[in-house]
Image (cartoon, grey):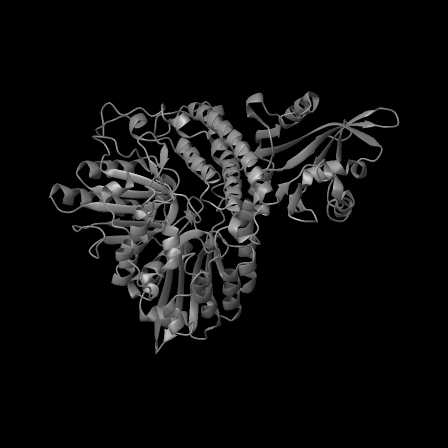
Amino acid sequence: MTNQADFLHSKFPIPQDCGLNTSGYNRFINRELSWLAFNWRVLEEAGNQNVPLLERLSFLSISATNLDEFYSVRVAGLRELARTGSNTPSMDGRNPSEQLKLIETEARKLIKEQQFILTKLRKEMAAQNINILTAAQAREGHSYLHEIFLSDVFPIISPLAIDPAHPFPFIPNSGFALALQLERKSDGRSLRALVPVPQQINRFVALRGQGHNYLPLEELILMQMEQVFPGYKLMGHCAFSILRDSDLEVEDEAEDLVREFEVALKRRRRGEVIRLKISVDAPATLRKSIMAELNVTENEVVEIDGMIGLSNLTELVFDSEPKLVWPNFIPRVPERVTDHEGDMFAAISQKDLLLQHPYETFDMVVRFLQQAASDPNVVAIKQTLYRTSKRSPIVEALCEAAEAGKSVTALVELKARFDEAANIRQSRRLERAGAHVVYGFINLKTHAKISTVVRREGGKLVTYTHYGTGNYHPITAQTYTDVSLFTCDAALGRDATKVFNYLSGYAQPKTLENISISPLSLKSTLLERIITEQTNAIKGKPAAIWAKMNSLIDSDVIDALYAAGQAGVKINLVVRGICGLRPGVKGLSENIRVKSIIGRFLEHSRIVCFANGSHLPSLKAKVYISSADWMGRNLKRRVETLVEIKNSTVKSQIVSQIMAANLADIAQSWIMQYDGTYIRATWSNDKFAFNCHRFFIENASLSGRGSAGAKDVPKLTHTDTT
């Protein structure tokens, strides 16, 4: 299998001078190349024999979806910078044109490898009686397929002739179509046409009979060409799909923010084509015609020798064959909630509660708001909404509360990429129910995850607060690992209220007691804590940092980590995706280790632990959960939270259970090298390969009345992550 080392290894030389005066090119890894390295790790899971077969198919689909989104947003942005002649370097010293060349080379390797892996997976699937057929292979079920076509496909397809009277039609972003060269049987007259493959129905049609046989929708359309173009003979055809620039710009002084976003979304649908994928054997005349109509150049065309549209492969992941998918598990209801017969307020008032999703069910977050909506003692609810599901039970609860006369304030973030349209619909619905809907700042995304419920208890008002690291989205919460803190601590409630006042009334808080927020104080808090560890190391005190996040790319934070590591601070980082820091370089970062965990669940929680003069794990540590990754956008251009954990049980749960298990993981871990490449963690055949996802499935959270902790996690030393 091609390895991402092939393109990264020679591109990041070992620094000649490893001091902090080293040029940006030498001390940082390029953001875009680091993202591609992450997508290689995702793709390599599709070839991992330790992963169930159909889950490997899912990893392949995810890698394809990731790459498409990367092109629609990141590459589209770089492309525009290059077109304007911008030579502004990235933090590693490359201008946009240089980055685009490297990206293009590597993306083509990825696409080729995706097709190679699909070929291998199809062979393994065939051994399990799961087949993706061609039209020729599906002839035996012709009558059944004919019925399916007429009932489920024919009514919604729109064959489009291409001639002076019928100009080339608009193909949306991610649109997939068949291009046809036809000849009329009666007189031999030629016709060029397109048939967009409908995205409103499943891509794969299940065939009747033994086993699991599927026919791609485009193959079914080709089989039924006589129904689509009666009287014509098919002379040649190809499939193609396109990606459009999906970046979104909004005028800063928009008078009506919702209306402005609705207009911007229409502009996005008509964004410029930045990539054309087309069948490798496309007839030359069709290929040339499609390129001309879409206004794409040769270097924007990728010929696919295989299947176009791999993101749809998730349709083939079914659970009727248990050995082919992950073992089933049921997310836990915390025992402490059960002790109180499901009453969230009673459970929280007893003690702070930290849940780790998906191992503890996200239903507890939904129940928290549903109980608030129906509780006559609740007088007010405030909620941030960044991403949520289409039929969100959380939005339902907020609407119910507003209709019942409670004061409901919903901060809806319209700038949540690719969820803008859904969030507009949710905001309209909330407004109709009587909620106060606010949209925060034009120039800042509100990415913080906060919910407050104000409840009348014994003649006084008590604020119950939820702080999360993930979105209020019941569907993604089934696969994303996140933590949720429930508390009725008065200080944390006051802090949350101040954040909401900042969002709704631009009332910038003068003081916050237990949290920091970006863009005001989050970054400075992180830097101060890193410097404190550095000072402790210089004084000969124990000094260490454990942190977990999705991305690390902010240059100031990276330089602070370099300086702390040089002073002797032992730094262990779990960074799932992009990492601009170079670990393990003598004189620069030999005390810093970076690993990435790619497994059954998508690592998403953001946590940071500072030793604070003691050895980790320790209850003396300074411990935080956050909504923010360590990126410039999160620290400067978003409203984010960094919440200090002071409750001893919750602190122990984070340090001795969650972080200890993540750092001890071997089975799903990749170790980052100085040049930006990653090596899969290895273990001897007689050694147990600790799997943190399995550990969390089997052991309840401490604050939910679980007992597994540091004693149940393999002993960790700093060198365990090498």
Q: Residue at x 21, y 39 (%)?
A: 564
Residue 143: image quadrant is: top right
| Above or below for 460 versus 263 | below
Answer whether residue 510 is visible to the viewer in this image: no
Q: Spot the residue most to the bottom.
A: 458
Image x and y of residue 10, in percent: 36, 23
158 and 418: which is toward the camera: 158
Image x and y of residue 244, in percent: 57, 34
480 sits left or right of 156 in the view: left
Image x and y of residue 347, in percent: 36, 70
Q: Spot the residue most to the right.
A: 186
Image x and y of residue 329, in percent: 46, 58
| Above or below for 97 versus 146 | above
Q: Residue at x 45, y 40 (%)?
A: 48
Answer whether residue 214 is visible to the viewer in this image: yes
Q: Which quarter of the rendered picture does the C terminus lie within?
A: top left
Residue 12: image quadrant is: top left
| Above or below for 214 versus 349 | above
517 sits left or right of 327 in the view: left
Q: Spot the residue most to the front.
A: 686
519 and 507: which is toward the camera: 519
Residue 286: image quadrant is: top right
135 sits left or right of 244 in the view: right
Q: Residue at x 47, y 50 (%)?
A: 413
558 and 221: which is toward the camera: 221
Q: How many numbered marks have been drawn onto this rendered protein structure?
A: 0
